Amino acid sequence: MSWVTVIWSMIAAACLTLAAVHLLDWYRNRAAWPWPSLAFSLMAVATAAFVFCELSMLRAQTPEAFGTALRWAHVPLWLSLVSLAGFVWLYLKAGRPWLGWSFVGLCTISLLLNFLVGTNLNYRAITAVHCSPFLGEPVCAAAGVPNPWLLLAQLSILVLIIFVADASIIAWRRGDRGKVLRVGGSTIFFLLASAAVLFWGNIEARIAISLSFLGIVVLTAYELSHEALRASQLVLELHESEQQVTQAADAANLGIWARDLARNEIWASAKWRELFGFTPMERLDRERMLQKVHPDDRDAVRHALADAASGEGGYELEFRTLLADGSVRWIAAQGQAEFDTTGRPVRTRGACSDITARKQTEQEMLRLRQEIAHVGRVSVMGQLASALAHEINQPLGGILRNAEAATLYLQHVSPDLDEIRAIIDDIRKDDQRAGAVIDRMRALLKRQDIDKRPLDVGEVLSDVVALVRPDATARHVKLDLEIESDVPRVNGDRVHLQQVLLNLISNGMDAIDEASKTVRRIVVSARRDGAQAVEIAVSDSGSGIPADRLEQIFGSFFSTKPKGMGMGLSISRTLVEALGGRLWAENRDGGGANFRLTLPLSR
């Protein structure tokens, strides 16, 4: 039995086995960029090829055979050394690139000279081959004329050692001392040993450099395996943590999910799948998730996820989902996008909860507030009834007088038809005037749900002012309307907006009565507020609001009036917020109060 052949074959087999294991690891996880595993696999394969070349040298019986084997041994040696440099740079994440590229350049030039000058890079000419016994059989070594270009190869090895030492120092200072000792220290030691055998001195190597390179491969494989074991342990710990988080999320009625942006794959907990109506084994991706969202909310969800991935990072929104039975479920969602070191989004995580019950409660509360608002409108109409009766009596009296005049004209033998036509036209106008007053009262008294639609601000304010003006005249309050020319249409509900304005104007007149001011004036104004809203203000000349009550007055059942219910301003704020706006109060310079509300523009 040839022990040399067995041992060197076992060395090659060990290298190839380790290369296969880590090459498979790289292939399965290449999306995570495990490039050190690829560099190690190339180095191990090259080392195995070098072992077979070296075995050929040990078996060579002639100078020609030895020189040929040594010449071709430089090819796997080049690949092994270059892969080693790449592994050190990738694994330690350190080293000066110019040193690494200098080594690669020198090593590549040495490989070319190996085929162009002399027998090989080591010898210009091999003069003899002599054999010595080893493990019970003869192994061969060569003697001959050294090649002066060997100095270039020696320089490349020196640069590689400097590169590894530099990378090790940087990693040591960074705190990765275990990696430095296992990778950097062992690599420098075995490089020095193999270089001494291969390049320096007239050493006739009977036991050649395969054992040195095997040492590098084994220690490097151990380091990678150590990292793999740590990764496996981390996976187990993460799995346990994931189970704990899932249990906590289920206890809080939360569904959690994570989306891999590169693969467009979604992992989700069982609760999240239940919220969206997915089966436990159904494949998830972005489009399938969006198909579960209500069509009216789908664009908002899509834009929120896109904005988070584009750089904003987080999102928070509420939307509806459609279930298989046609029912609607409200979902509150919040999440965060994660980015790699280059700023590229790689993952999105989030949590969702069912807020259907809360939304139903909010809708019920809004309905009750609308009921109270309806009662308030009826109460206000009772206060305005006398003034409105006077306004209606005027057109009715005009109709009666015109009808009597028309009767007298018709009694003539030759009635004046032009005059009769004018009288009929006056009757029609008075009738329309009375009808408009009645229509405004009917619309305001009518109970209805919120119906958002584009509204002309000037038209709405004019209707309200026309409705309130008789009462203002009776109370000796001057009511002015100021609308800027560039006020656009808003998105709102006509009746609810009229109710809010009517309540604010009535409160303003009450404040003027309580203050007993000589200047009795209310101004209703409208102007554009930026690019997204219109601001409407009701300003009175009363005594103003105490500073500590500017926000209290919007609370339920809080009133400054002796007989007030304390619901008018609370309902008004609720109605404005339901229309997508806001309502607040502030004091005017010189006395009086401003009530301001904003409404979104119509799109």
Image (cartoon, grey):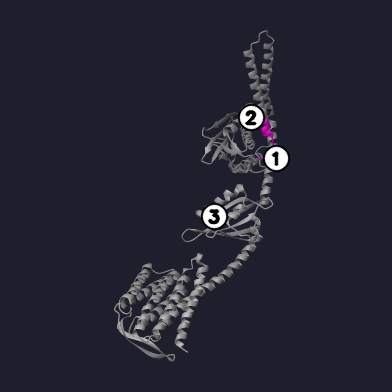
List the residue tagged with mark 3: 314
Q: Are marks 2 and 3 in contact (CB under 8 Å)?
A: no
- Residue 269 image point, x, y percent: 63, 61
Q: CA distance from mark 2 to mark 3?
A: 48 Å
Q: Which mark is residue 371?
A: 1
**What secondary structure is marked by label 1?**
helix
Front residue of 465 and 460: 460
Magenta region, residue range: 439-449
Local crowd at mark 3 within 10 Å, few (<14), some, or many (≥20)? Answer: some
- Circles 1 and 2, Cβ within 8 Å, touching? The answer is no
Look at the image and tell me in which quarter the C terminus lies: top right
Going by the numbered disc 1, the residue's amino acid type is Glu
Return the residue nearer the eye: 193 or 354: 193
Q: Secondary structure at mark 2?
A: helix
Q: Of tags 2 and 3, which is closer to the observer?
A: 3
9 magenta-colored? no
Disc 2 marks which residue? 467
